Image (cartoon, rainbow, N blue to C red):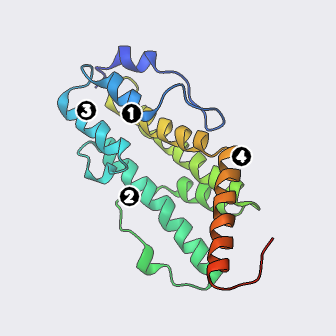
Amino acid sequence: MGGYEYLVSSLPALSLEAPPPFAPAEFRFKCQGVLSDADLAELDAVLAGRAADGRSAFAQAWAAGDAQIRNTAAKMRGAKLGVEAKPFLKSHPGYAVWLDKETSDALAKASPLARETGLDGARWKYVEDLARADATGLPAVLAFAVQLTLAARWAALREEAGRERLEQLVTQLEESAAAGGAADFK
């Protein structure tokens, strides 16, 4: 256990509400030469969203927890839409009752933004819980990597970028309609 005390103690605090101080790729670069080759491979799997391919207890537990969140979301959304969720569910070991409750509470929120924030909040809490297994070892490093990825995703979701994307979609729609012979949209 332990082994990465210096690295873990040097990591900045992260939040879903603030842009991270560096990108996940930069974090990976900072870990080169500090993590063992096997641990660096685990970090690569987690950063690439392939935790299920990892060999560590953390990677396997994170993959299972994320699958549980996605399964609960699929069941709730399927029930709301009258669609059978079973074909979309992914088998996973273990079950955390509190994680199911967090997911259900997040999906019960009124706005899509609040729901997504709640789901990522559940993910954040889950990896914090997993990191407690070894607060100065690989689990803490991998938990930081997951949180960094989540924070980076939220930092990329800015109003300006959203407006630009909306304008692109409207332009595409107008061009498609004009090509199909529809009357002027404007």
Q: How far separated are the C-alphas under marks 2 and 4?
A: 38 Å
- 152 vs 30, left or right, is right
Q: Which of marks 4 and 3 is nearer the N terminus?
A: 3
Looking at the picture, does residue 147 appear above or below residue 26?
A: below
Q: Quadrant of the N terminus?
A: top left
Quarter residue 9 falls in: top left
Residues at badges 1 and 3 in contact (C-beta under 8 Å)?
Answer: no
Which residue is denoted by mark 2 in the rendering? 94
Q: Earlier in the sequence, mark 1 or mark 3?
A: 1
The x, y position of residue 44, in whole percent, is 30, 39
- Is 1 or 69 nearer to us in this picture? 69
Q: Earlier in the sequence, mark 2 or mark 3?
A: 3
Residue found 76% across the figure and 83% down from its top: 183
| Amino acid type indicated by mark 2 | Gly
Question: Which class describes the residues within 10 Å of circle 2: few (<14), some (14-19), or many (20+)?
Answer: few
Q: Which of marks 2 and 1 is nearer the N terminus?
A: 1
- Report helix, strand or loop for mark 1: helix
